[in-house]
Image (cartoon, rainbow, N blue to C red):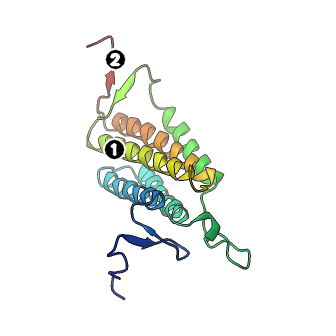
Amino acid sequence: MKIYTKTGDRGETALYGGTRVSKASARVESYGTIDELNSFIGFAKTEINNEKVLDQLRKIQFDLFTLGSESATPTDKLTLANGKSRLTLMISETEIEELEQWMDEFETELEPLQYFILPGGGKSATSLHICRTVCRRAERSLVFLNETEEVRPELIKYLNRLSDYLFVLARYISKINGETEEYWNPNNR
């Protein structure tokens, strides 16, 4: 099978379930941004040497594929004629709680926040800050999609929590790498 199908040459693509839509649609934008986030996380992994963190990021990449497949499926196509779900995996509270648990563990080793942190803190932490901002964009795109088409709330909640996780992880990586965090303190101009 060839990788190119030529079916998208006129600016349309097929969603999971067969519906054809414009490549500029809100749904395609949302799962495209989720895919972009997944790629940035893959890049961030190349800068990190902590196995525990790498295991978490691998799990997150897996979850993002799961989330992307659901965001690529119109709600009316999620259920098959026999009543079963078209998707074998879907994001649930379990994955959201997992992110919260990981954050809680990292935060026990971090100084409390007193000021906003400027993105930076070394190459690995900076790459995680980039992931965080792309994650926020992915979240905004799903919220935008949800204004016209139903999106399960767990998807938006997962991305919201993931951006928090990426922020905390960037701080943690800065700390274990001995990199200094820079603060935005409006009193020190």
Of residues 189 and 57, which is closer to you in this image? 189
The number of numbered badges drawn on the structure is: 2
Q: Of all residues shown, which one is farthest toward the right?
A: 83
Relative image position of residue 160 (x, y in whole percent): 52, 43
* Residue pictured at 46% horizontal, 43% vertical: 163
* 168 on left or right of 184: right
* Residue pictured at 37% horizontal, 53% vertical: 41
- Disc with the residue nearer the chain's start (2 vs 1): 1
Mark 1 secondary-structure assignment? helix
For disc 2, the neighbor class at 10 Å (few under 14, some 14 to 19, many from 20) is few
* Placement of 118 over or under 186, stated as above or below: below
Q: Quadrant of the N terminus?
A: bottom left
Q: Of all residues shown, which one is farthest toward the top?
A: 187
Label annotation for residue 130: 1
Label annotation for residue 185: 2
Splitting the image into 4 quarters, where does residue 10 fall? bottom left
* Residue pictured at 47% horizontal, 32% vertical: 109
Of residues 165 and 24, which is closer to you in this image? 24
Of residues 188 and 156, which is closer to you in this image? 156
Relative image position of residue 57 (x, y in whole percent): 44, 54
Relative image position of residue 95 (x, y in whole percent): 59, 53
* 121 on left or right of 112: left
